[in-house]
Image: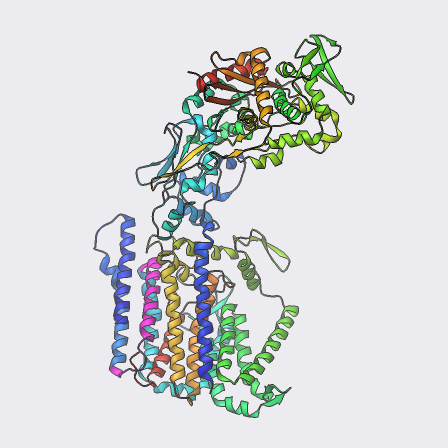
Amino acid sequence: MILEKRAWWIGNIFCLFLLLLSLRIVYWQLVRRDLLNPQGLDPVALAVGGNDQGSQDALDFLKGGQVEALAAPPQPFTQRAIALLVEITRGSIYARDNQVLAADQLLAGGEKQRIYPDPAFANLVGYVSGIRIGVAGLESSFNQTLLGLDRLDAQLGQLVHQPVVGSDLILTIDPVLQHAAEEELAGRAGAVLVLDGRTGAVLAMMSTPHFDPSRVLDQNYVNSLLACGGAECRAPFLNRPTQALYPPGSTWKTVSLIAALDSGQVSPETEFDFGQPVQGPNGNYYVYEVDGGVIPDPNHTESKLNLEMAYARSANAAFARIGDEMPAETMLDYATRLGFGPEGYARFPVEIESSPSQLARNPGELSSNNLLRATTAIGQGELLVSPMDMARVILAVLNDGRIPVPYLVDSLRLPTGGSTRGPLRGRVVRGVMKPETARLVKQMMITVVESGSGGQAAVPGLTVGGKTGTAQLGGSDAPHAWFIGFAEREKKSAAIVVVVENGGQGSQVAAPIFARLAQMAVGE
Amino acid sequence: MLLGAAGIMLVLGFGLVWGAQQVQAGEGSLAGLPVALFSALAAVGLWIAFHLALRWRGMRGEQVFLPVIVLIFSLGLIVIFRLRGEAGAWQQITRGLLPGLLIGGAFALRPGWVDWMRQRAVPISILGLMLALATAAFGVQDESGARLSLKLGPLPAIQTSEWIKLALLIFLAWFVDREGEVVEGRARVFLGRLRIPPVRYFIPGALFVGVATLALVAMSDYGAVLILGTLFVAMLYAGFQTRLFGTIAVIGLALAVLVGVALALTWDVPAVIQTRFLAFLNPWSTAEVVIDGRPTGLTISEGPGYQIQQAVYAAASGGLTGTGLGYGHPEFIPLAASDFIFAALLEEMGAIVGIALLALYAILLLRILRIAVLLPREQVFERLLLVGIGVHFFTQVFVMVGGTLNLIPLTGVTIPFLSLGGSALLTNLFEAGLVLALAQRLEASPL
């Protein structure tokens, strides 16, 4: 009888199977913990017409609905995520001076509520939705940090059911500048971005019109915002400094100038001869003709200008020629180095939602279509960029061709005490252009303010440089008013971008806003 | 000692569950505690009575088996009490524990009854088969269309698939005992290695297994089919010599493939199996379930995958030590007290208790196999019966826990001694009684 041996095998094989089961338990608990990690459920998307029953249930739950309503299938994830999240104390978000921007507040009865004391920070802080999950702004992109789920100690603590407390975010934003930016844009749609010129720290990031995050869970409020047209409530959930894409207008001439100077195509001595002006109903203007297309240049009266004054006067004919004569590869190369286009976008991470810029609908066409290249060089063409994209150009000029990557999060404060620096703080991208090129462009930007189109940007006592822009939109819409520039005093410097949607002339509308913000940012 | 510890654990567990419910209800009075502990104390009383009866009979030989069962049962009863309250615990005791201890105890106290059973193995197993056929034909249909239980007059409905497995076990043990050596002696050598006995020796076994399988398929109890198959293979493996078993395995496998292909060609794979398999591959799939080319309007994640999702979420959220009794959310899990009791246990008691429970089943299996090995060689029927009982316990655990954790496709069976379910507990306790009866044939040993 061989039963002894057979029983030995049966026992061994079956114990092996039991070991497999044990390993499977460990697999679900350790390897696939992400199953339980929360996902965003967006009340705004819901209002736009999403029919996600899970989000709707979660929203009802937070507004005091019944958990029983969630017990019905098929929402296993929602049930568990809610159960998990009500136990976590979400981290707070603070401005530079420790002003509270977002925090969990304990209500009577042990429930928690997210409060947002200052709506001026709405678009950059974002909001937390139905089941206390960030779905916009920093609340979304730092969701895991704010929940503490990215920390090993919290993950291990969760295994033994220690209550999880999230990490706090300390931002670089200066509330005084942020509020000043809001006042400057009051009643108009637009964006303001103020950055520390040396470090890339974001001092103000304003988007108007904006929403009130403390009312986002009120569906009537969200519906009324979304139903409203007009400039006073257009796209209130968009964070314009990073997400909105505008034609850059003449501010783009700075990029063309950098590319042409750095590649050796032009030098400060280059002269532009515009030939005979054309008679028009509103006075004479110059033109640049290429491949049958005509680019008008009404910005100056001189028939000859050197490079510096062509830039200072924003001479379209000069920069159309630069674009016409520039190889497409050079144009794409410098744009990518500065963070434009999909490839450039990938080189410069942004801490909140942002949109990649567009150089042309089909960038391959730039090499064959001379007219497109010429119009692109003056900032029209098919260009679409965000204010953050243009801010990087200023930072590169200010820092001898290096770009300190703009960042919003100064540090993370851990509940265990101690802190770590923000993920992007201190990161620098080098070799964007030669240092000499940067210094030449910087000087030319100063000339723009001293004796060119940017006169209204001047601030007594500060060294100010910049570039105006008036982005034509076609049709009867008023152009977007742009001003990009920097202000310096001793060691302090700031890079500032102002966009006023349909504001008119950049030199008249955006430049004065720049001047007042520059005074606040680096003035005495 | 172990028995006492299990009893204390049971009472403490009930107290914990009750305490958690009081805390969550915001009450602080101890007035309701005696009522809450009543079923726990009743269970402890029954086990102690059983233990004393065995002592009185002079039980020797196996001292680990019973306490391990009491531990497993106690864990299960705590979870059942947590999920179903006093009514659930009371149902488990009156429908399962009490009759099971009576029947199992009768065998344990009268070891000679096993001989009586061996002599009547054929009529007993045929009776079990008839019960299965009767269930397949006249059983009570549940909402999913499966006929699992038989209602006889005023008695509570019984799930007969448990009895079919037992009948097969007894039949195979008898067959190998009676015919084994004859079969091996008459086998002819083929191709130098294979030894094939005359075909007529296959007929009774094949007939019995075939009829039982068909009855279970008619009852839509595919989990039981799986267990039946494993039992069949394991019993033949334990009973026959290598070459003979190898031959039977080869022929059996070839036959199974042939029959399987033939069935698949002529007969649609049952919808239940199709959907279970799809859900196993990806329980979160949002693909629509299509049965035989007809869309059902139901996605996998909402339909067949829903239970697995809930079970896996529960297992993952319990963590190492569990949420604590009464502080998890096992109410989200469907069938949490019966089929998915292991998921509920993992959530509230954690991976530590879950893995310890699996270890307890390993101990159970090894103790049963130990008795089988130590029994005298000539008691072939008894030894094979023990191997079969051990394999039966184990496969039930593996099929259900594996399904719960999405390690294998899900089929609903009960976990021995743990799940809520009177018929299953009754059968399992009867098998435990057989083990205890045979253990008394061993010489007394300290462990």
Tally of numbered tags:
0
Q: Residue at x 35, y 64 (%)?
A: B76
Q: Identify the image quadrant of the C terminus of chain A.
A: top left
Scheme of image coloration: rainbow
Measured from the top left, where is residue A407 in percent x and y? 48, 32
**Which of the 4 image quadrants contains residue A18?**
bottom left
Asked whether B64 falls inside the magenta stretch, the response is: yes
Residue at position x 58%, y 90% in the image = B187
- The part of the chain drawn in magenta is B56-85
Left or right of A335, for residue A461? left
Above-or-below relation of B182 to A314: below
The answer to which quarter of the image holds residue A360 is top right
Majority SS type along the magenta span: helix
- As for residue A203 lying within the magenta part, the answer is no
Observer-nearest of A108 and A95: A95
The answer to which of B147 and B253 lies nearer the viewer is B253
Image location of residue A429, percent across then percent down? 54, 33
Residue B155 visible in the shown view: no
Q: Could you say which quadrant of the image residue B442 lies in?
A: bottom left
Q: Is residue A141 left or right of residue A290?
A: left
> A89 and B167: which one is in front?
A89
Residue B211: x %, y % from top left:
54, 78
The front one of A386 and A348 is A348
Vertically, is B16 above or below A438?
below
Residue A68 visible in image: yes
Task: Tell me residue B249's x, y (percent).
Answer: 57, 79
Task: Give above or below for B39 relative to B374.
Answer: above
